[in-house]
Amino acid sequence: MTHRAGFHLVLPTSRLSSTSILTSTIPADAMSCRTPWRHFAYAPRRHIHSIGHWPSSLCAPASKPSPAIAAVQSRFIHNDGPKTSNPLVNPPAVSRPPPLTLPRRRDYESTPKYYFEMGKGYLRFYKDGLKNVLASRRLLREKLKRTPADDRPSIFRPYYVPRTFSRADWVLLWRVRHDMIRLPLFGVMLVVIGEFTVLVVAYVDHLVPYTCRIPTQIFGALEKAEQRRKTAFDDFESKYPHGVLSPRVTQGVARSHVLKSLHISGGMWDKLGFTPPGMWQAKGIYRMAFLEGDDKNIVEDGGPTGLEYDELRLACADRGIDTLGKSETELRSWFGDWLRLTAAEDIVERRRRMAVLLLTRPENWPQHRDFGVPEWQFAGVVGLLFPRSAGARVPSGTWTASNALGWVGYMLDSAYDQSEISTSRGAEEAVEYGVRMATVRTVGSSLAHSYSGDRIHLRLRSTLDSALCPVAAMSLKNDSFPSSAAFDAINAAINASDADRKDAIKQGKGVYAFKLKNKAGEEATWHIDLKDSGKVATGLGEKPTVTLSLSDENFGKLVAGKANAQRLFMGGKLKVAGDVMKATKLDPILKKAQQTKAKL
């Protein structure tokens, strides 16, 4: 993978103190527990445009540092970092460029002497960068030795994420691959040109290992990538003003845009006006494979709050999020949005969600998870495509395993089986919405999406008299737990029809238990069985896959949309036990519970 952010620049100056080093090395809000993990919460985005927020680390003096400063510098170089950093999500510091130490002009009366020392500084930097490549390779080899033979990664199956790999291991793997390919040619260049390598690298950026890229080179690459991304979106929006769901936006169009917006293909192809055949297979597939594995491991290993600032900037740049002039808080906000909006257990659904975000400017990303996705996806292999029909897939208010953080819900995907998606030019037809008993088929916000005279609409089958599964006659509500009425709503939605129930079981594959405690200190339990029966009942159920414990009052607030799951979890008011991956997407299930209660 090509990474273009996160480096350390050492500027020797006598005015820097140990205090200034500490404050410039660690961002002010990096240690704050208030830094939002935006998987579920939504807050207004702040746009801060100050170049002062760009480099994450201004380092230490190069000449005769005091013992205190030397100690700080040593810890910094070895990336001990803040105590809150998570080693599972942060790869070792040797996978990033080393500090660059350059002389001060005023310390040398002789100009030739100054430039000679400057050349030596660059040469030391490049040598240290090469050492970092080899050190990273050694770390990776040690990890692979400890990895079972059947679980080792392979370039021939880039989408496979080893079960024993953490996010840090996954990133290290891709960085070593990236740098080792470039190491031989760059090594020859360094031997032949020596100190003058710095004068050439700007013209052969793609040949330089990431650990050997100087700060100005990284900054220039970021500027170029962000400008190219802006141009790519301007061109895309002018051709397809209705966005990713436009019928004219095909898989090929999307791939071409992503190659440019993520700065994957060379900029020369933009000037030539075309993308060479095979570029996606050569580069695009591997970027998508990296991102899929990266997203999965970040969520499993503790979330984005554990990312160091340098790694946060790299992660954002890899996903097409501009980083120049952005604060750490703002970047964590964007990155949290990416994880929240793309989260899905089904790989096809996840890729389609990624496609929407990659073809939309971050400032225009959907506010909520119930957004329309295209029929095509960024396939993992050549020619892999899962078409349902021409045009866009419009998700109705279906419940899916990808829609809950520790909560389970399933989109009634049978809406696709019992509906006809059509396009009529100039039509102002309203959505015909049929509801019978406790059947809930809410129409997603994407149904309101129109195409300059074309309106996508959902025409439900005129009859909804298909066989309905009997909803349990006995109420699940416990008078001592007012919020428990929500389980009746969930039960009604899942068992609205036989098709709904079978689809929920097919997608859920687990038992989801809820343990509530009322003001009197009494406890009661409920569970949703999406492993065998598809029923909602009292008790923990047999071997629950995940168990969520919270107060009856807080559960009621969550169902009513008056409480934030993240804040409850971080405050210890919501506890999750078991398969945490089943507990990552909360908002949609709560909304469906609200809608179902309203219908009932």
Image (cartoon, grey):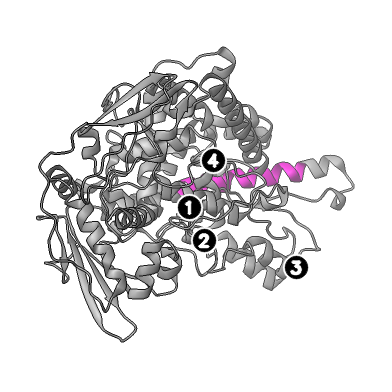
Numbered mark located on residue 125 in the image:
none
Q: Is residue 28 magenta?
A: no
Amino acid residing under circle 4: Pro
Secondary structure of the residue carrying numbered label 4: helix
Q: Which residue is mark 3?
A: 17
Secondary structure of the residue carrying numbered label 3: loop
Distance Cα–Cα, label 3 vs label 1: 35 Å
Q: Which residue is mark 2?
A: 36
Question: How many neighbours does mark 4 have within 10 angstroms: few (below 14), some (14-19), or many (20 or more)?
Answer: some
Distance Cα–Cα, label 2 vs label 4: 18 Å
Q: Nearer the viewer, residue 399 or 481?
A: 481
Question: How many neighbours does mark 2 have within 10 angstroms: few (below 14), some (14-19), or many (20 or more)?
Answer: many
Give residue 595's position: percent from left, percent from top. Answer: 34, 53
Residue 415 in which image quadrant: top left
Amino acid residing under circle 3: Ser
Q: Residue at x 55, y 46 (%)?
A: 129
Distance Cα–Cα, label 1 vs label 2: 8 Å
Label 4–label 1 contact, CB within 8 A = no
Point out the tag, 2 or 4, that comes first from the N-terminus: 2
Q: Which residue is mark 1?
A: 336
Label 1–label 2 contact, CB within 8 A = yes
Q: How many marks?
A: 4
Point out the tag, 3 or 1, that comes first from the N-terminus: 3
Q: Which residue is mark 4?
A: 362
Amino acid residing under circle 1: Gly
Point out the tag, 1 or 2, that comes first from the N-terminus: 2
Question: How many neighbours does mark 1 have within 10 angstroms: few (below 14), some (14-19), or many (20 or more)?
Answer: many
Specify start and end residues of the magenta stretch as a single range. 116-134
Is 200 rendered above or below residue 305? above
Distance Cα–Cα, label 4 vs label 1: 12 Å
Q: Main secondary structure of the magenta part?
A: helix
Point out the tag, 4 or 1, that comes first from the N-terminus: 1
